[in-house]
Image (tube, rainbow, N blue to C red):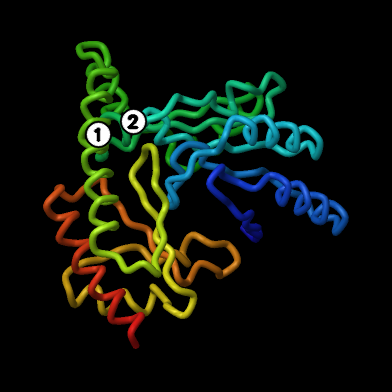
Amino acid sequence: YGGEMVGIPMDDEGMQIDILEETLAKLKNDRKKVKFIYTISNFQNPAGVTMSLARRKKILEVAKKFEVLILEDNPYDKLRFEGEPIPSIYSLDNEGYVISLGTFSKILCPGLRLAWILGNKKIIEKLVIMKQATDLCTTALNQLIAYEYCRQNDIDKNIESNVEIYRRKRNAMLEALDKYFPVEVIWTKPQGGFFVVATLPEHIDTGEMLKEAIKENVAYVPGGSFFADGKGQNTMRLSFCYPSVEDIDEGIKRLGKVIKRRIKN
């Protein structure tokens, strides 16, 4: 639809709000209309980074200043392994600037593509019209499955069980990275969610290196896919949610060998 994506850098506290503010000011001066600010505030995909409370408050201030909506995508909110939960940006907003997205696919069943959206009533009304034009409505069967599960079971216990499983896998991946990856590589250490991002030396193109990794029967997502400006060619997303602990160890071991060969060459 002709939209232009503008990326904002992140660090260990999430989106860098000072750069966001500078970018919005520049776009305003260039007479470009910003539709919304998109962020995954908890355990971001792909980096696994969580936005700090201070920055959540600041991004809300910036949104109000420039009169821009925030789209807070929050699918991993309940999948916290350690640390204290941080209030969502949506919960901090009392003026209708934030639209919040959630999903059952991460807390109940990945095959159940059922989600929800929270926001200003007028915005929701427009989204309903768009939804009807797109696919009429979400399948009633999926809605009934989720409803009956929640009615007959304790979904919080299911989430707790999932968190324990994912925590073990996260730990296994971080241990394997320490064991098998060369010292030239750094990676994020998420407190929840599904993903770790590894950053390799700048001369290594992970998109090209993927061919070598596949020959070793291991795969990852090249990080460049997640950058709006074409950067991140030396990064990769690693997912620990699906493979077993044993496969995580073996996979990282094989990937470590591929990276070491690339660094030597």
Amino acid carrying mark 2 in the image: Phe
Q: Residue at x 31, y 25 (%)?
A: 143
Amino acid carrying mark 1 in the image: Cys
Of 55 and 261, the residue lying toward us: 261
What is the spatial separation of the Cα atoms under label 2 and label 1, in whole angstroms? 7 Å
Q: Which mark is residue 109?
A: 1
Q: Which mark is residue 7?
A: none
CB of mark 2 within 8 Å of CB of mark 1? yes
Against 18, residue 247 (above or below) is: below
**Residue at the far left in the pictured view:** 246
Label located before the other in sequence (2 or 1): 2
Of 152 and 163, the residue lying toward us: 163
| Mark 1, secondary structure of its residue | loop
Say how many tags the image has: 2
Would residue 95 appear left or right of 5 to someone viewing this image? right
Query: Image quadrant for the C terminus?
Result: bottom left
| Mark 2, secondary structure of its residue | loop
Q: Residue at x 66, y 25 (%)?
A: 122
Would residue 170 appear left or right of 187 to someone viewing this image? left
Would residue 4 appear left or right of 191 to someone viewing this image? right
Q: Residue at x 42, y 46 (%)?
A: 48
Residue count near mark 2 (Cα–Cα under 10 Å), binned few <14, some 14–19, many ≥20: some
Instruction: Where is residue 112? Give x, y as percent.
Output: 27, 35
Residue count near mark 1 (Cα–Cα under 10 Å), binned few <14, some 14–19, many ≥20: few
Query: Image quadrant for the N terminus?
Result: bottom right
Instruction: Where is residue 24? Give x, y as percent.
Output: 77, 50
Mark 2, residue position:
104
